[in-house]
Amino acid sequence: MAYASAGPAVSAPILGRVTAVFANFRQSQADYRLFKTTMNELHSLETRELTDLGIYRGDIRAVAHKSVYGN
């Protein structure tokens, strides 16, 4: 005996959640790339330039993290 299903293969709520997971993953990747770029740019500055900005070399990671993630 055979039958056909008229409903969608994947329900809308599940599809929405999967889409949200991928969107969050892409956003996380973009945030991380921005964090690494910020770190690299700050590390490329001379100590004098960092001092003018009020940043100590040891604080670069924290400053980059706060600028990207806001924490």
Image (cartoon, helix red, strand yellow):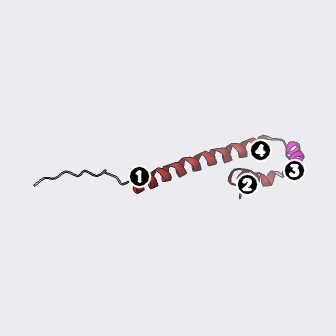
Instruction: Tell me which label, 1 or 2, sits earlier in the chain.
Output: 1
Q: Which residue is mark 2?
A: 66
Closer to the camera in the image, 2 or 24 = 2
Instruction: Tell me which label, 3 or 1, sits earlier in the chain.
Output: 1
- Image x and y of residue 71, in percent: 71, 59
Q: Is residue 22 left or right of residue 57?
A: left
Secondary structure found at label 3: loop
- Which contiguous range is marked in magenta? 46-54
Label 2 vs label 3, nearer the camera: 2
- Image x and y of residue 43, in percent: 76, 44
Label 3 vs label 1, nearer the camera: 1
Q: Is residue 40 magenta?
A: no
Secondary structure found at label 4: helix
Closer to the camera in the image, 35 or 21 = 21
The image quadrant of residue 58 is bottom right
Q: Amino acid at mark 3?
A: Gly
Q: Residue furthest left?
A: 1
Q: Which residue is mark 1?
A: 15
Instruction: Tell me which label, 2 or 4, sits earlier in the chain.
Output: 4
Q: Amino acid at mark 4?
A: Leu
Q: Which residue is mark 3?
A: 54
- What residue appears at the point 41 percent right and 56 percent down from the top-left corner? 13
Q: CA distance from mark 3 to mark 4?
A: 12 Å
- What residue appears at the point 71 percent right and 55 percent down from the top-left corner? 70
- Image x and y of residue 32, in percent: 62, 48
Secondary structure found at label 1: helix
Q: CA distance from mark 4 to mark 1?
A: 41 Å
Secondary structure found at label 2: helix
Q: Amino acid at mark 1?
A: Leu
